[in-house]
Image (cartoon, coloured by chain):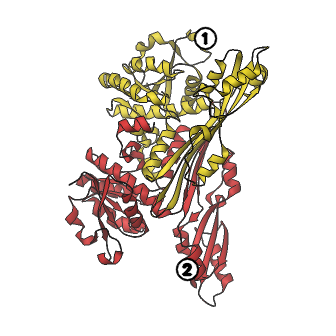
Chain colours: A yellow, B red
Amino acid sequence: MNNKIKIGIVGYGNLGQGAELAINQNPDMELIAIFTRREPNSLGTESKVENISNILDYKDKIDVMILCGGSAKDLDEQGPMIAEYFNTVDSFDNHGRIPEYFDKINGVSSKSKNLSLISIGWDPGLFSLNRLLGQCVLPNGRDYTFWGNGVSQGHSDAIRRIKGVKNGVQYTVPVKEVLDKVRNCEDINVPPCERHKRICYVVCEDNEDLNKIENEIKTMPNYFAGYDTSISFISEEELKINHSKMPHGGFVIRTGNTGFDTKQKMEFNLTLESNPEFTSSVLVAYARAVHRMACEGKTGAITIFDVPLGYLSPKTGEELRKELL
Amino acid sequence: MNNKIKIGIVGYGNLGQGAELAINQNPDMELIAIFTRREPNSLGTESKVENISNILDYKDKIDVMILCGGSAKDLDEQGPMIAEYFNTVDSFDNHGRIPEYFDKINGVSSKSKNLSLISIGWDPGLFSLNRLLGQCVLPNGRDYTFWGNGVSQGHSDAIRRIKGVKNGVQYTVPVKEVLDKVRNCEDINVPPCERHKRICYVVCEDNEDLNKIENEIKTMPNYFAGYDTSISFISEEELKINHSKMPHGGFVIRTGNTGFDTKQKMEFNLTLESNPEFTSSVLVAYARAVHRMACEGKTGAITIFDVPLGYLSPKTGEELRKELL
């Protein structure tokens, strides 16, 4: 027996693999098992793997389950199911449906006396925290979120759903001129479609009408219409070589006035070579907070706004005050 | 009667004046009184002013006292005295002495059942929070704090203490080449004296030996020795016109690796036209958190690491989840 924090991972896509790697970087944590719907032997990892149907065998053996379901749909099902038996942390990222998901999880985990931290990652997550901080410190101001440069999974999927498209990757890129204006404390009101460009690399089936596909992408409502969208048709091989990584990042900037028109600016930004590895690193740090808050008796659903940041650290309050304050 | 948060300000230097302005930007707060050691009528404000000797008359009339004493020395005396009767928030910024100050305040406020939040501002404060966040999310990495461009009060004071110097202002400036390397994820180990330049504007008495003064500044241990220091001798009038503002800012950057050598970067930066107005805006936002945590029964001394960021906002948890997550 040791007193490491016992972690389970549910789902072994990009996020789950990232969580496995991140746990290795945190010596106060131990990965007990990975739970998957796939054949356990097929995962190609040296960690212990279980079919998800055996998850209840681990009821008293795991302190926190990190839910790495690949989509909001996975979490919709798995979140409430697992929160009935375990403390959880997840990265539910459908912003519009967060209140509904929160209520559902809160109902389950309040009753089961577990603690569930939802919507952790960088957006929602660290970016949300910085939007909040900006609004509270500079109430007389405006905040701006820029995403990119980075691969948007949702937009890449949208391209791949088009008939005649074999594969595709979409990069979201902040418009530099707008970013510079914001950083220069110009108080401008620019909608997301004017703050970002969309750059697409598309692999088509043979003999497709490229103009038709290009037009279909550029006019797709909610995804590309209204955006400055550029499209390059490339080969499957080129896509694999040059566009198989998942970089991302972005900026949360708050500009505002204090006193008599004194300009102040706060900025938080991320440059990530791997979006899923970073997101899962955030999940793992917050799993520590879940464990510690659960040990203190906290139950129900919570968000990043409810977590004192000291709980993320393996260090004591005394050490943090001495070394980091 | 209303249910606004009732605030008192102790001390009416730059910070106290900033706090007064910041409270005006927060409609859920009300400034009850400013407490000063000076003659109350001499302050030139329309807010209610009291001599600090009358502070106990306000014992049940103020929810949180914002301690704006001008120096760590003021807080050493006022902190424990006031924490005996009121909830407090202060900006105690002598990093090396924080543990000792924490223990002293904690002793008083635990006994008096008040809540005292210490060392709030941007460094210590928001920068500390970002150093913590970086270390927890990217445990395999390194963090860098750069200060500036901005006026360092401590270094300006050090110049003014030199015999023959009438006045002086010192700007701390990050070395751009080093900042660029760090932002470029180069893993470098550079001491503070190589990360910052010191730019000084000095007004001398008539007929002083400028070379001697220049040499005395450049070789002053702990302040300037080892730094790239440049000195311009100017007139009192020029100092007033060009160097009477108090801009500041800085950067906290964490670079690290996840997985198999994947580079990740987190950055928080501030560009402030007025250091004291920003610091006091942070104090005012955290005064709200102190009030709310005290209402929930929390007592003793705490730091920025102990405060869930949702408590900074006048909005409910439900509103925050819907609008900001």
- Residue B97 in sight from this viewpoint: no
Where residue A178 appears, x then y in whole percent?
63, 47
Task: Name the residue rendered at 63%, 88% in the picture.
Answer: B208
Q: Which residue is mark 2?
A: B167
Numbered disc 1: what chain? Answer: A
Residue A216 numbered tag: none
Q: Residue drawn 34% across and 24% down? A: A109
The foreground one among B37 and A168 is A168
Of tags 1 and 2, which is closer to the observer? 2
Which residue is located at x 45 percent, y 56 percent? B121
Q: Quadrant of residue B87?
A: bottom left
- Vertical position of residue B147 compared to residue B316: above or below: below
Check the image and report above or below for B177 versus A51. Answer: below
> Under tag 2, what secondary structure?
strand
Mark 1 to mark 2 CA distance (whole Å): 73 Å
Q: Which residue is mark 1?
A: A42
Provide residue A50's location: percent of width, then percent of height: 51, 13
- Determine whether A289 is above or below B153 in the image: above
Q: Residue B230, how many percent across, how many down?
A: 67, 71
